[in-house]
Amino acid sequence: MRIIAILVGHGQLPKDLPEETRREYLVLKAKRDRTREEEERYQELERKITNWPRNQENDPYWSSINKLAKLLKERSSLDKVIPAFNEFCNPSLEKALEEACKENCDRIIVIPTMLIPGGVHSEEEIPEAIERIKLRCGCEIIYLWPFDINEIANMLMAHISKLADG
């Protein structure tokens, strides 16, 4: 059985994005009723930002998601682990799902890095993206969420214990 995992992180704006571009983008992103010209400009900025060259220095979050995806692949029997992002970075979750569907796999497991309930990304946007792709994809898609809050507490306590004992 071929299994592909998609590790979904939030995403962030790169540190070296010019402040003027950042400001203009965020203003347009927050605006609900954009004119046609504003929508075109917003889409242009969105393409520029999501395709911005990323590295450890200008986007440590992007780098960490990619590093975690690599570690998950190395430590599992998964055929592939694809990093994806909810916003600001490529690939988007939808693009990653489309890529996975083309790989002739039997199952796709979507794993968010947002661990606890209460966020719009994990509770609404990710399930909606999965549902849109399920209609076109020939394999099973499993959303590995929500996580057991007791397991999260145990993980955090193990980390706290290391600091307290050290």
Image: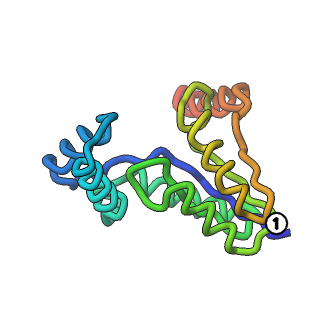
How far across and down, in percent of the image, does residue 72 sit?
65, 58
Q: Nearer the viewer, residue 135 or 123?
A: 135
150 shown above or below 71: above
Whole-percent x, y for residue 50 in the image: 36, 58
- For label 1, the residue is 106
Residue projecting furthest to the front: 36
Q: Nearer the viewer, residue 52 or 81?
A: 52
Q: Residues within 10 Å of mark 1 (few under 14, many from 20)?
A: some
Q: Position of residue 39 (x, y in %)?
A: 29, 49
Q: Residue at x 48, y 61 (%)?
A: 91
Q: Position of residue 134 (x, y in %)?
A: 72, 55
Residue at left 54%, top 30%? 119
Tell whether 100 sits left or right of 2.
left
The image quadrant that residue 68 belongs to is bottom right
Q: Which residue sits at x=61%, y=49%? A: 129
Residue in view at x 62 percent, y 43 percent: 128
Give the left or right position of residue 147, taking residue 124 as reference.
Answer: right
